[in-house]
Image (cartoon, helix red, strand yellow):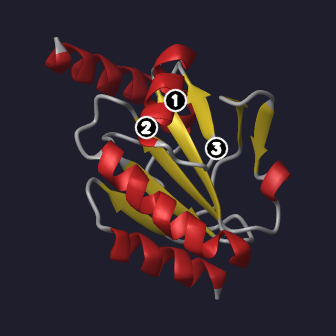
Amino acid sequence: MRLFFLLLMATLVAACDGGGPAVKLNTGDPAPNFSARRLSGGQVSFPDDLRGKPVVVRFWADWCRYCEGEMKSIEQVYRRRQGQGLNVLAVNVGQDEKTVDAFMRKIGVSYPALIDEEAGIAGKYGVIALPTTYFIDAKGVVRGKVLGEADEATFDKLAGDLLQ
């Protein structure tokens, strides 16, 4: 069942761009704009709501074997660097609000969770696997990307680079 869901998600993400060529978002590219529902209520519009601020955009799902540990690692970096201006947006891919809420409560992170139930934002960012994390500078330019598993030191270095 889990394999079926993974294949379904990969298909949804691949289909999000309307059948055109696959999106490949790299370092130096402008980060795509998006609007999403915030788990805690209201909407987030990126980059408008965070213009001039560095942002880590993290794509995840509760079934992802690395996401829980990494989200906790990102929480540690966020707590250390939030006062320096770091922002984190945890974009859940393909799951409903109830599932997202239960997972966020379970792991106890304080940064905002966004709902991307149809995987449209993930499609704009070219996400093909979870977890995927983008490090976006205050000008809205992608300065780093982590595909798959990484440790707290890696997240801290990339976040620190954004803040310089």
**In x, y percent, where is residue 85?**
73, 72
Nearest to the observer: residue 110 or residue 74: 110
Which quadrant would residue 14 be assigned to in this image?
top left
**Badge number at residue 112:** 3
Element on which disc 1 rests? loop
Q: Position of residue 108 (x, y in %)?
A: 49, 43
Q: Secondary structure at mark 2?
A: loop
Q: Secondary structure at mark 3?
A: loop
Figure check: 29 above or below 108: below
Q: Looking at the rendering, in which quadrant would you find the N terminus?
A: top left
Q: Is residue 102 visible?
A: yes
Disc marking residue 17: 1
Q: What's the residue at 84%, 50% (across, down)?
A: 48
The residues tagged by marks 3 and 1 sit, at their Cα atoms, a distance apart of: 25 Å
Furthest-bottom residue in view?
Answer: 164
Q: Earlier in the sequence, mark 2 or mark 3?
A: 2
